[in-house]
Amino acid sequence: MSKGTYSFTTPIYYVNAAPHLGTAYTTIAADTVARYQRMNGYDVAFVTGMDEHGQKVADVAAEHGMTPQAWCDSMEPAFREAWDMLDITYTDFVRTSEDRQARTVRAFWQDLYDKGFCYKGSYEGWYCVHEETYYAESDLEKNEDGAYVCPDCKRPVQQAGGEENWFFKLSEFQQPLLDFYEEHPDFIRPETRRNEIVTFVKGGLKDLSISRSTFDWGVPLPFDKGHVAYVWADALLAYLTGIGYADPDRPGEFDARWPMQYHFVGKDITRFHCVIWPAMLMAAGLPIAHTVFGHGFLLTKGEKMSKSKGNALRPADLVGVFGVDAYRYYFMSDVQFGHDGSISLERMVQVYNADLANTWGNLFSRVTNMTKKYFDAHVPEAAPSFSAENPLWEMSAGLYAAYDEAMGRVDFTTAAREVMALAERANRYIEETEPFRLAKDPERADELAFVMYNLLETIRICALYMAPFAPNTSAEVFRRLGLGDVTEVVDIEAATAWGQLPAGGLVSVGDPLFPRLDTDAIDFDME
């Protein structure tokens, strides 16, 4: 039986360029949660997609001599192919140019208009096309030429004055938002993001422009066809579209899945998700998602990865060197989710060799080879007459609670460390028990069978816990152990209980799961 629904999103990504390591980082994190919570018994909804409207997209399309729709259509394969390559198991991919998204936008804003939360006015101030954000002059910075620039991307801003817009009464939600933050301390994570947002809201909120009338690449507002929805007034609503909001073909789905457990976003867009988005939901009378998790940036040479700096690597660059599973494992285990993380080729090789090649891969290779040598490649049956201390059973018995708690708070680093600690303990167990010596003494055959069964069973359990991080490798381990499909597990707590590896099963010996890598032999530059 399902434990219930578990729903979450990545951002709806801009289509101005193909996915890079930063977008892949967020998406792999969401997929790690998706894979684990499915194994943990939940009915998972995982929404991602493409943010296709707005002036920035129209400008990029024009630069390429294409219509906005044609440009967006050309970018869809880049995203889908990247997520397929990384084995991302999303349940819905929302394009904001789709008819179903337009239906959501119209239904949502018509509702807020009818409730009196929208009014027409004129905006005076500054606008950054790249960030799709309006700024007060006091928020801006100046470049070396004395011109105003965006405080976030440092690009020149445009003066916006006199354009007629529709506004959302965001200012009315200042105190309700502060009260909500106080009552729900886990809504904004990590704590540093929460402190930033609370300080921002306490500084005062201004009403938000939700429309543009100077271009038509967007969803027309239902109550004023001359205005299209401002990009954030459109894109945020894709989270609702992805779980069936206002969709007659998906009756009951939205009510079953909303509110969501998580929105995973980069820290640079937490303000939209933690201020504008909850205020919109309050106005609509809808519950607010449990948590917005604003993770940190990936840094190379101390700088944020970005397309403008030319250091935004493609996921395929690293997958070609390390493989998909090692790529996924590195970013989830070594880069603490929530903090900025400095990445380098040298560190990736170090983690690959230490955790995957030397610990996990070496354990599997040693044990399967010994099983072939000592038991003709069959899982031995531990003789009931033999009894001894079993540190692997004792350690694995407490693993689910620690792992589940870490994954529940999206602390991937701790969860991965828990699994790797069990694999490390199994390697030490080999040194302590010395199966190669036991095999030389016929009178210790029962003890050898006991030891080898413990090692094989530990490998089975490790493979289950490694599956959210390295799904292909876990599937291969299960195949070589003669077991079923690891992705079909829907109760990981029960599946990791000790003693479920059938005796007598045939164990396959094959190539190393993770051949060691030599940094000097890799022709690749992270800069």
Image (cartoon, rainbow, N blue to C red):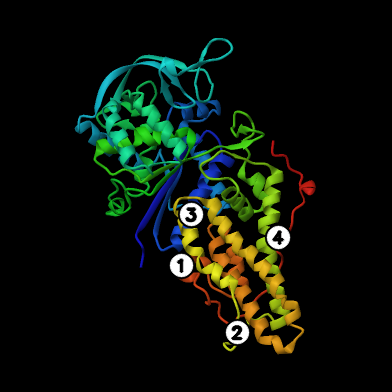
Q: Are circles 1 and 2 on residues that touch, CB within 8 Å? A: no
Task: Please name the residue that numbered disc 4 is placed on.
Answer: 358
Does residue 113 sit above or below 80 in this rendering?
Answer: above
At 77% from the left and 51% from the top, the residue drawn is 518
Q: In terms of sequence position, does the residue under pointer 1 or pointer 3 come before the other?
A: 3
Q: SS of the residue at dot 1?
A: helix
Query: Mark 1 and mark 2: span between their CA atoms?
Result: 23 Å
In what element is the residue under mark 3? Answer: helix
* Horizontal side of residue 86 vs 104, given as left or right: right
Find disc 2 in the rendering and name its residue: 381
Q: Could you tell me the amino acid type at mark 3?
A: Ala
Instruction: Write the residue at 71% across / 76% down.
Output: 370
Q: Are marks 2 and 3 in contact (CB under 8 Å)?
A: no
Label 4 neighbourhood size at 10 Å, few (<14), some (14-19), many (20+)?
A: some
Disc 1 and disc 3 in contact, CB within 8 angstroms:
no
Q: Is residue 126 left or right of residue 471?
A: left
Q: CA distance from mark 4 to mark 3?
A: 24 Å
Q: Residues within 10 Å of mark 2 (few under 14, many from 20)?
A: some
Query: Residue 493, labelled with which disc?
Result: 1
User: Of marks 1 and 4, which one's residue comes earlier in the chain?
Assistant: 4
The answer to whether residue 393 shows anywhere in this view is: yes
x and y percentages locating residue 343 in the rendered image: 64, 41
Residue 305 horizontal/vertical position (percent):
60, 34
Given the image, on which type of amino acid does mark 1 rest?
Glu
Location of residue 389 in the rendering, given as x and y in whole percent from the top left corner: 60, 77
Q: Is residue 122 above or below residue 152?
A: above
Q: Secondary structure at mark 2?
A: loop
Quarter holding the N terminus?
bottom left
